[in-house]
Amino acid sequence: MITIKDKNILLLGLGLHGGGVATARWLHKNGAKLIVSDLKDKESLSLSLDNLSKQKDISYVLGKHRERDVKWADIVVYNPGVPKESEYLNLARKLKKPIYNEASLFFDRCKARIIAVTGTRGKSTTAVLIASMCKKKNSRTILAGNIKTSFMLDVLDRAKEEDLIVLELSSWQLEGLDVVKKAPHIAVVTNLHPDHLNRYKNLANYYCSKKEIFKHQKESHYIVLNDADKVVRDWQKEVCSRTLLFSKKDHKGIGSFVKKGKIIFRSEKSEEVVASVKDVALEGEHNFENILAAVTASKIAGVKNSDIKKTLKEEFVLEGRQEKIADKNHIIFINDTTSTTPIAGIAALERFGNKKKNIILIAGGADKELEYADWAKQVKKYCKKVYLLEGSASRKMRSSLSGIRGLSDNHNDLGILVQNISEKADKGDIVLFSPAAASFNMWNHEFERGDSFNNAVENIQL
C-alpha cells in the first residue's frame, strides 16, 4: 500500500472539474505534506480553490509548474489534464520518483469489489445503469469515477469490503492501474471510436490506454466486451479473465443479446429471458448497447432478473446527455453538451432526426484531430439549419458541410445565438445543442458549456 502520511507530495494539476479537488482533499486528509501546482492562474481556479479553503496548510504554485517542486516531492500525483508526456512527469521518472493518479491511489487501497466501465461512448449511462441494478441487490453499491456526481477519492475512505463500487474510468485514469498492478473484478468496455487524438500520438495509442482495464485481471475476474465492435471483440484473444459478450444480435457466446423482442442472457448452462424490449424506458437506439452491457455486468454480479427489469422500466436522464431541458412555444430544446466527438453528434442526430428535417443544430468548438465526413452526412440528412460556434473543429465542419443551405458559423455568444434561433424557429422544431467537438476554446469544460446553453434557453425573451 502506498504510504501517504508525512510524505512530500506534489499534485500536478488541480483543474476545474472537481477531481483535482477530491484528490487534494484526500491527500491532505491522509496526512500528506502537499504542494498543488497548476498552469492556470488563481482567478481561473477560484472555484476549485474555494472548495479547498478549509485545508489551510496546502501550498499552491499557480500559473506554472516548477522543477524544484518535483525534486522536493517524495511522490508525484497527476490529474487527467496533465499529459503523461509532461516534462515534469518525465523529470519525476528520471529522478525515480513514484508517480500516481487518482485511479492508482484508489485501486491501491479500495477494499470493496469494483465494476469498472470504460469506452469512448456510453460509459456514464452504462455505469449508472449497472449501479442502479446492483443497488437493488446490494444497498451499499456506490457509483463514482469519471462522472460528475461523485469522484473516486471522495468515497475511498468510507468504502467497506461488503460494498460494491461501480466506476466510470477514462483512458487517462486507466493509465494509472499499471503502476499498482490492479484491475477491477468486472471490467466493461462499451465501444471504441476515434477520440482524444489531440492528446494521443495515434489511434492505436488511445485504444491501448483502454486495455489497461484488463491488463492485470486474473482468471477469476470477468470482462464484458461489445461483440458489435470489432476492435473490442478481438480483445478476447488477449485477456486471461472470463469473457462475456453483448450485442443486439445473437453473438453465440456467453452474455446478453436481443431475440424476438426479448433481452436474453446466456450462461454456460442455459438461456433466460431477463426482460422484454418493451420494458426499456431509456430512449435512443444507441442506448441499447449500453443497456445490454449493464445487464451482462449485473448478471455476473448476481442481480435478479426482476430487479434488472425494474431498473429498465425507470426513466432517467443524465445531465447534458441528449437532455430535453425545455419546450417553449412548441419548440424543443435539447442539451447534449457531452457530445464532444463526431460519433456522439451522429447518435443525437439519429435519435432526434426524422423525415420532417426539423432539427436546428448548434455545433462546433475545439478540434481533437477528428474527422467530420460521416457526421456531415447525417447533418445534411436531418437538419434544416446549422449554427457553428467559433473554433478549429468548426472550420473542419464547415468544410465537410460544403454546399449545405442554412449554414451560419463563427458564433461566439451562445445567449444571443439561442435568442435569435428561438425567434426564427417554427413550432415543432428541435433546437439540438450537440457540439460534436471539445469546449476548451470558449469554456473551461463541457459542463460549463452545457450550463451556458441552459441559461441561454432559460433567458429567452418570447
Image: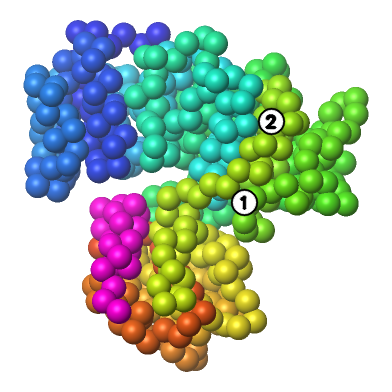
Residue 307 is marked as 2
State the SS at label 1: loop
Residue 424 sits above or below residue 161 on the image: below
Q: Give the side of residue 35 with respect to residue 17, left or right.
A: left
Label located before the other in sequence (1 or 2): 1
Magenta stretch holds residue 66: no
Label 1, label 2: how many angstroms apart (C-alpha)?
A: 16 Å
Residue positioned 71% across, 37% down in the render = 309
Q: Horizontal and vertical percent for residue 317?
A: 50, 50
Q: Horizontal and vertical percent for residue 366?
A: 34, 64
Question: Which residue is nearer to you in this view: 46 or 377?
Answer: 46
Residue positioned 29% across, 28% down in the render = 22
Residue positioned 37% across, 76% down in the render = 388
**Which residues make up the magenta segment?**
443-462
* Quadrant assignment for the N terminus: top left
Looking at the picture, which amino acid does disc 2 mark? Asp
Looking at the picture, which amino acid does disc 1 mark? Leu
Looking at the image, can residue 119 be seen? no
* Quadrant assignment for the C terminus: bottom left
Q: Horizontal and vertical percent for residue 293?
A: 67, 40
Q: Residues within 10 Å of mark 1 (few under 14, many from 20)?
A: some
Can you identify the residue that label 1 sits on?
A: 282
